[in-house]
Amino acid sequence: MAIYSLTFIALAFWVAFRWARHTDEAGHPARYRLWQTLSDASFGVYLIHALFLLLLLKWLVPIMPVAWSVGLRVFILWFLTAGGSLIASLVLLRIPILSRLIGRSGPLPQRKAVAPAAERAHGQSILEEHEAHERMIVYDIEQRIAIKP
């Protein structure tokens, strides 16, 4: 077993070395975006695959023909579980808040940009505008938690 493990590790390093040796202008190896996307989705696939497997075992396996070989049925089940989990994980990666459920933080919605100095009311600086906003928040909190006699 040790010989097999060492041989496989050496083979994996050799393949990775060959892959990383050929880079594009940005310094990325071939098909970098594909592997990066799969890497981002992998933890989500791990988390979601049990749900797909449970659904497929409940609904698909009972309707599969018994005449099919066991190997074919297992392959179909594996392929649909892995494919469904991957697609669901990739979709969740694109949704800002839900992407955090599968281990990667997607882009959050952009905040409204601060208006340029020329457009600010009465020539307020950013600091003055920020301080006024903080005073409003503190006043609002004080009003909400004020204890009525």
Image (cartoon, rainbow, N blue to C red):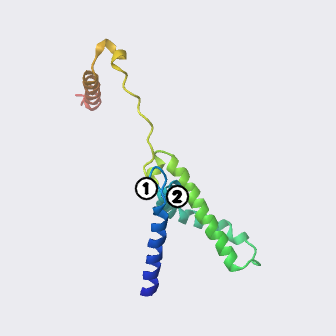
Give the mark toward the camera: 1 or 2: 2
- Where residue 24 sits in the image (x, y, percent)? 49, 53
- Horizontally, residue 97 falls left or right of residue 74, namely left
Q: In terms of secondary structure, where does tag 2 sit?
A: loop
Q: Three-letter amino acid code at disc 2?
A: Ala
Residue 89 against residue 82 in the figure, above or below: above
Q: Position of residue 23 (x, y in %)?
A: 48, 57
Viewer-proximal residue among 7 and 77: 7
The mark tally for this picture is 2
The residue at the point 56 percent across, 59 percent down is 86
Q: Residue flagged by tag 1: what amino acid is it?
A: Gly
The relative height of residue 77 versus residue 148 in the rendered view (above or below) is: below
> What residue do we see at 45% from left, 43% from top?
107
Q: Which residue is mark 1?
A: 103
Give residue 133's quadrant in the image: top left
In screen coordinates, is 101 left or right of 142? right
Residue in view at x 39 percent, y 28 percent: 113
Residue at the extreme top: 122
- Local SS, label 1: loop
The x and y percentages for residue 33 are 51, 53
Q: Tags 1 and 2 in contact by the CB under 8 Å rule? A: no
Q: Which residue is mark 2?
A: 30
Instruction: Examine the rendered structure and indicate whether residue 87 appears above or below residue 134.
Output: below
Percent position of residue 57, x then y: 63, 69
Residue 43 visible in the snapshot: yes
